[in-house]
Amino acid sequence: MTAQTTGRRVVTHMGLSLDGHYAGPDPEDMGWVMPYAVTDVARDHMTSLWEPATTALLGRVNAEGFLGFWPTVIGMEGADPRDEAFAKWLVDTDKVVLSSTLDEAPWERTTIVDKPAADVVEDLKATEGGDIVVFSSASVIKALLAADKVDRMAMAIFPIFLGGGPRLFDDDLPAGKWALVSEAAGEHGMLTLVYDRIR
């Protein structure tokens, strides 16, 4: 058994509280993430994930949030160069948005697909390109974990208890082992972790 190394990798990333939630009881309130998201370790972690990627896979809600905000960072006065680089990558890269409600994409270089996430990544992996990265789209990541389609799983762990809210890891996920690829401790006690699926 070896870590996945050939072909296009499916890479996921999610920020989690120490008690295992990706959002609190009010899913709209992401203020708890902000002190950590703007740290050097968080920005370097995100850069290491998007730089090898040529496709962003997003759920509709996440796409609307990301593509509504990130393009505004380009050219913003005082923007961190890593944030601006991510914003440019997000605009310029191929994007696949999973949606049963959108008919056409309001964003450039975007394809709308109404299919299960596992089927979409199988189709993408049959094409040429770099990593297929899923940033913070919980429904997409959960579906890919359930189908055992994640090759690299990245997390940022924030030292906070949210006391409730949705969890990333459901019961009855397929059993499997993961190899630690990298770890970093950051400001305010956060950790970034990257694991590769051992197959």
Image: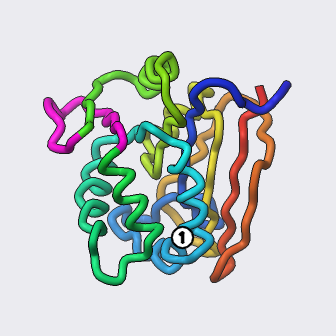
Asked if residue 171 is positioned above or below residue 48 in the image, the reply reads above
Residue identified by numbered label 1: 162
Numbered marks: total:
1
Q: In which quarter of the image is the C terminus?
A: top right
Residue bounds of the magenta highlight: 93-108
Residue visible at 43% across and 65% down? 25
Determine which quarter of the picture holds residue 77: bottom left
For this view, does 195 lie left or right of residue 97? right
Closest to the observer, 71 or 167: 71
Q: Position of residue 180 (x, y in %)?
A: 79, 48
Asked if residue 177 is positioned above or below residue 114 in the image, the reply reads below
- In the image, is residue 95 part of the stretch drawn in magenta? yes
Determine which quarter of the picture holds residue 5: top right
Q: What residue type is labelled 1?
A: Leu
Q: Is the magenta stretch mostly helix, strand or loop?
A: loop
Residue visible at 42% across and 61% down? 85
Closest to the observer, 171 or 68: 68
